[in-house]
Amino acid sequence: GRVYTFEQLYQTVWKQFPIGNVQNVLWCLVRRIRKKMNKIEKKAGRCIVNIRGIGYCFRSKYAEENTNSKLTKNIGREYNKSVEKIVE
């Protein structure tokens, strides 16, 4: 999947330009999201992959392995919406 930098993610989520180092803020947020995803479906949080020093991407391999999963379908839908917003 496409890699989004920490700055791109910060700007998309908080609708403002990042000031300083935002890696830790996003790391904490992604950690909480993964934890919530794993409560719904075991190992679902693995679809969000950290690209060290750059940002995050969505790992489609998890989605391909679990195509019947409600959570995976929702993640894919939300991922597509976020990509559309960034591209606009």
Image (spheres, helix red, strand yellow):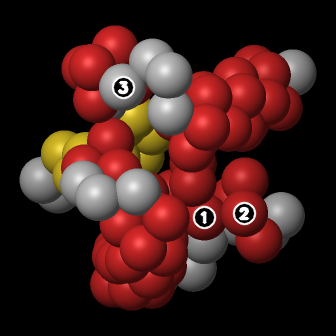
For the residues labelled 3 and 2, the Cα–Cα distance comes to 27 Å
- Identify the element where label 2 is drawn: helix
* Residue identifier under label 3: 66
Instruction: Out of 6 and 75, give the one closest to the viewer.
Output: 75
| Relative image position of residue 48 (x, y in whole percent) | 34, 48
Examine the rendering and report whether any part of residue 41 can be seen: yes
* Residue identifier under label 2: 13
| Relative image position of residue 64 (x, y in whole percent) | 34, 14
In screen coordinates, is 81 left or right of 28? Answer: right
Question: Which residue shows up at 72% across the image and 63% down it?
Answer: 13
Q: Could you tell which of marks 3 and 1 lies nearer the N-terminus?
A: 1
* Residue identifier under label 1: 10
Answer above or below: position of 31 versus 73.
Answer: below
Tag 2: Cα neighbours inside 10 Å, few (<14), some, or many (≥20)? few
In screen coordinates, is 69 left or right of 35? Answer: right
The C terminus is located in which quarter?
top right
Examine the rendering and report whether any part of residue 83 can be seen: no
Q: Is label 3 or label 2 in front? A: 3
Q: Could you tell which of marks 3 and 2 lies nearer the N-terminus?
A: 2
For the residues labelled 1 and 2, the Cα–Cα distance comes to 5 Å
